Amino acid sequence: MIERLLPPDVVAVEAFADVPGEAVFPGEEDLVAKAVEGRRREFVTARRCAREALARLGFPPAPIRPDPRRAPQWPAGVIGSITHCAGYRAAVVARLADLAGVGIDAEPNEPLPDGVAEAVAGLDERDMVDRLARTDPSVSWDRLLFSAKESIYKAWYPLTRRWLGFEEARLVIDPFTRTFTGHLSVDGTRVDGGPPLTELRGRYLATADFVVTAVTVAHAQRVVVALP
């Protein structure tokens, strides 16, 4: 499902169920030592998806530890993203040589809990969500907007190493192309020296059960000047 939203350079692995009794991978036990069983299962399956994706790039299995902001730490030269929700887990990876950034998120296709939409969406975004809901009520557009902002953050953070609040990315969703654009209102200076991030674009997929979003950041094109 998730691979339909991503370019060919990205390796995607997903799962719709957990393996009963699957053990935590060595070196990750402390990360879920105090977690409830449901959280433990989704963690184990999502990390397994990530290792399977890395194996397709030629990397041996290894613990995937989080950084201080809980973002997964990938092997040198690799970018990636992980997501999980009830009934779905996925991970994507790519070589840094092929892509600058990637972020994915999956959510149940159901309305956000009361009060959450007001915290993640501005008035203009809520108006947009209302218009979209009147046009296509099969999609929980507030949840899709939330998911898109999660994907934007997951692509943003490794490139900037800075927090990005929900209110700092204003979304425009295009239901005809199934794409979205997040217009950023904060300094987008990148730690890799690439062009500052002023907006991030992504794609989405909505099924009866899930809304899934993905954002990719391409490397800036190199301008080649032909010498006379």
Image: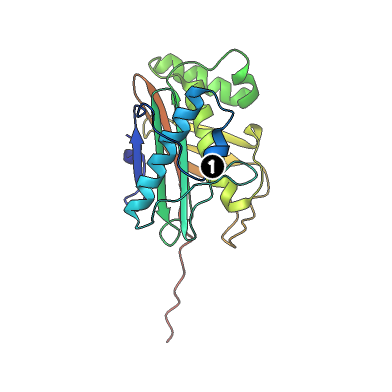
Q: Which quadrant of the rendered structure holds the N terminus?
A: top left
On the picture, is 120 further left or further right than 82? right
Mark 1: few/some/many CA within 10 Å (<14, 14-19, 20+): many
Locate residue 228: give its quadrant.
bottom left
Residue 134: % across, % down: 44, 14
For residue 104, say whether it is visible. Answer: no
From the viewer's perspective, is residue 210 above or below residue 204?
A: above
Locate residue 59: give its quadrant.
bottom left
In the image shown, does 136 or 82 lie closer to the viewer?
82
The residue that appears at 49% across and 60% down in the rendered structure is 76
Residue 108: % across, % down: 44, 21
For residue 25, say whether it is visible. Answer: yes
On the picture, is 205 further left or further right than 96? left
Amino acid type of the residue tagged 1 in the rendering: Lys
Q: How many marks?
A: 1
In the image shown, does 97 or 45 lie closer to the viewer?
45
In the image shown, does 218 or 209 lie closer to the viewer?
209
Give the residue number, with chain letter if any, for mark 1: 154
Residue 183: % across, % down: 58, 40
The residue that appears at 63% across and 42% down in the rendered structure is 69
